[in-house]
Amino acid sequence: MTQPLWQKSGVQIDAKIMKFLAGDDVLLDREFFLHDITASKAHVEGLANIGVVSADEAAALKRELDVLATDFSAGGFVLDERYEDGHSAIEARLTERLGDAGRRVHTGRSRNDQILVATRLWLKDQLTVLQVHCRAIAQVCLERAAQPALPLPGYTHLQRAVVSSTAMWFAGFAEGFIDNALRAQQTATWIDANPLGTAAGYGVNLKLDREHTTQALGFARMQVSPIYAQLSRGKFEMAVLEAIGSALLDLRRLAWDLSLFTTAEFNFVKLPAEYTTGSSIMPNKRNPDVVELLRASYASVAAARTEIEQLLSLPSGYQRDLQFSKGSLFHGCRHGLGALELVPDLLARLQWNEVAMRAAIEPAMYATDVAIEQAAAGVPFRDAYRAAAETAATADQGRTPESSLAARVSPGAGNDLRLDELRGRLDQLTG
C-alpha cells in the first residue's frame, strides 16, 4: 500500500489495523472515483483562482486528472489494495507525475469533503436513473391502459369484490410511478448542494472559491455550513434510498399481483418466457422467479437504509463510522435500480387471459352497482345496501362487465380513467 495521506514520521502502522481501517474502501471507491476526479479538477480551479497554485500548475493538474480518468475508464489504471482509498490514489498519481504540484492538490480540503462531494454527485446520478426508470414504467402502463379494457376481477382482502379492468389496473400503477418519478425529482432538488470546501467540517483559513466549485460541478446551491455538511452525510443518502424504496414498494405490490395472476388457480396472466425459469427437478415447471425477486427487491433497499440509519447515532462532526455507509449505499442503489430497469419490458409484453378473467367474475360482484343505483334513485343507502346483499347471488341479471365499467363514471374509474391528465403529469416531469 502507498504511504497513507495521514502518515507522520516516527509512527509505525500496524498492518492488521491498517487492513481493518481500509476495509473494502478502495474497492467501493471505484464506483465514486470518476466523480472524485471531477471534483478534484474543480478544486484545482478554485485554488488557482485564489493563487494557491499557479496557472501552469493548475493546467498540468487538470491535464493529469483527465488522463487518470481516461486510464481508469479504459482499465489502464486499477484502483486496488496498493491504495488506502480513491482519494489517496488520486494524490499519489498526481505526485508521481507532477511532483510538488501534486502535493499541493489537497490544500484546503479533507478526505471528508472529498467523499461528501463525490458521493453527492453520484447520488444525483442515481436519482436521474431512478427518474428514467419510473417514467418508463409509467409510460408503458399508460400505453397499455389506453388499449381496449378487458374485464378483470377487483379484489379486497384477496376476495372477489367488484368488476375492474386491465385498464384500471395499469392506470393505477401508471399514477404510482409518476409519483415515484416526482419524488425522485424532488429528492434530487433537495440534495443538490455542494459540500466541497467545508474541509473536515470547520472550514479553513483560506478564502476558498466555493462559488466557483459549486457552479463548475453543476450544483444548484452551496452547502454553506461546514458543520451541516458533515451532519448531512447519511441523511442525504437515506433520502435517496427512500426515493428508490418508494418505487420498489409499488413494484412489490405489482409483482405480488403478477405472482398470483400467473398461478394455475388464477391463470389471468402469461409472462414472457424470458421472465420464467425451469425447476431443477420438476420437468413440468416454469417458475416466475424474476417476478418473485422483483417482489423481494425492496428488502435490499430497506436494509441499506436501516444500516445507514443505525450508523447515524453520532455526535456532530466527522466520525469514521460512516465509512461503512458506502457499501450499503452502493448495493442498495444498484439492486433497487437494477430491479426497476426490468419492469417496462415485462409490462409491455405480459399477456392477459380474457377467458379466465371473465370466468372469475361472479354475480355478487355487481351487488355494489345495484346498491349505488338504488341510492341514486332515492333509497337510503343503508337500506339499498341490505337489499343488495340479500339478492347478491342474482345481481348479474341484465348486466355485463362492460356495462358495469361503462356506468363507473366517478373520476378515475372505469369510464373516466383520466389518462390525459396522467399523461400531462408525466410530460411535466419529462419536460
Image (cartoon, rainbow, N blue to C red):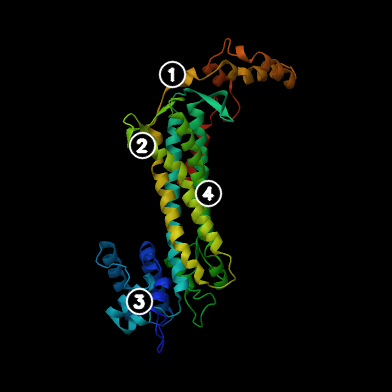
Q: What type is the residue that disc 3 sits on?
A: Glu
* Three-letter amino acid code at the position of disc 2: Tyr
Spatial separation of the CA atoms under disc 2 and disc 1: 23 Å
Mark 2 touches mark 3? (CB < 8 Å)? no
Tag 4 and tag 2, C-beta contact below 8 Å:
no
Q: For this rendering, which residue is in front, 78 or 202?
A: 78
Disc 4 crowd rating (10 Å Cα; few below 14, some 14-19, many 20+) is many
Q: Is residue 233 above or below residue 367?
A: below
Instruction: Give the residue at mark 3.
Output: 91
Return the x and y of residue 161 as percentages of the image width and height: 58, 24
Left or right of 278 on screen, residue 246: right
Regarding residue 304, the answer to whether it shows in the image is: yes
Labels 4 and 3 touching (C-beta < 8 A) = no
Judge by depth and name the residue closer to the eye, 383 or 321.
321
Kindly identify the residue that appears in the image at 41 percent across and 73 percent down.
43
Q: CA distance from mark 4 to mark 1?
A: 38 Å
Q: CA–CA distance between discs 2 and 3?
A: 46 Å
The mark nearer the N terminus, 2 or 1, is 2
Question: What residue is disc 2 on?
Answer: 275
User: Alpha-carbon distance for marks 4 and 3?
Assistant: 37 Å
